[in-house]
Image: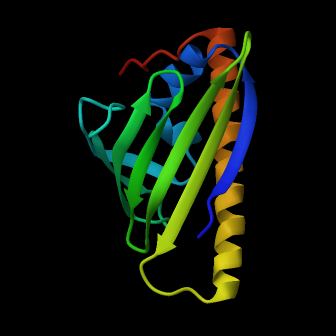
């Protein structure tokens, strides 16, 4: 399948965006469908690191990700696999003076043959999911820039 892509421009430097992007404690608040981390290599986000995570109920289930390329403040490329698909996902940071363009790109291949109409629907759902992720991320980043990093709740 051809890659599906979405972009957003956020206020702030690429370093700020990247720091939040790779913060595993925050992923569930902005990644569409993300449930929780099962395992994450300590080298994350460096090349070779792997992540295993589960989606929220009704989602893709278990997802495996492996970093195949990482460039600080520029982006990361992952090989991804879940029960139905394999593919790649890229995040690209394009630094500006006081803003950063973030682009998400996903290219999937179904493990089983998909009818043409299902491929069209999948592309639409993927695009919607990427846009939701980027929109939620921009809200998280703006809040962090305005109010600082959220503090852990005391028990």
Residue 17: quarter of image: top right
Q: Look at 60% across and 18% down and name the residue there.
A: 14
Residue 90 visible in the shown view: yes
Q: Look at 52% across and 66% down and name the residue there.
A: 108
User: Which is nearer the eye, 57 or 45?
Assistant: 45
User: Which is nearer the eye, 152 or 62?
Assistant: 62
Measuring from the top left, give residue 9's x and y in whole percent. Answer: 75, 29
State the quadrant of the N terminus: bottom right
Measuring from the top left, give residue 125's x and y in whole percent. Answer: 68, 65
For this view, does 6 lie left or right of residue 86? right
Q: As displayed, is residue 90 above or below residue 142? A: below
Q: As displayed, is residue 130 above or below residue 141? A: below
For this view, does 98 lie left or right of residue 51? right
For this view, does 63 lie left or right of residue 120? left
Q: As displayed, is residue 85 above or below residue 117? A: above
Q: Look at 53% across and 45% down and name the residue there.
A: 90
Q: Look at 69% across and 11% down and name the residue there.
A: 146
């Amino acid at each position: 399948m051809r890659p599906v892509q979405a972009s957003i421009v956020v206020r702030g430097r690429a370093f700020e965006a990247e720091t939040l992007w790779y913060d595993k404690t925050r992923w569930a608040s902005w990644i569409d469908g993300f449930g929780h981390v099962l395992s994450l290599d300590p080298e994350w986000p460096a090349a070779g690191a792997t992540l295993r995570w589960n989606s929220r109920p009704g989602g893709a289930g278990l997802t495996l990700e492996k970093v195949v390329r990482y460039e600080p403040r520029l982006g990361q490329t992952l090989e991804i696999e879940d029960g139905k698909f394999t593919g790649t996902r890229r995040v690209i940071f394009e630094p500006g003076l006081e803003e950063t363009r973030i682009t998400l790109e996903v290219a999937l291949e179904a493990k089983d043959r998909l009818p043409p109409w299902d491929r069209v629907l999948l592309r639409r759902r993927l695009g919607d999911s990427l846009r939701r992720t980027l929109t939620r991320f921009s809200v998280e980043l703006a809040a962090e820039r305005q109010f600082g990093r959220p503090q852990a709740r005391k028990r």
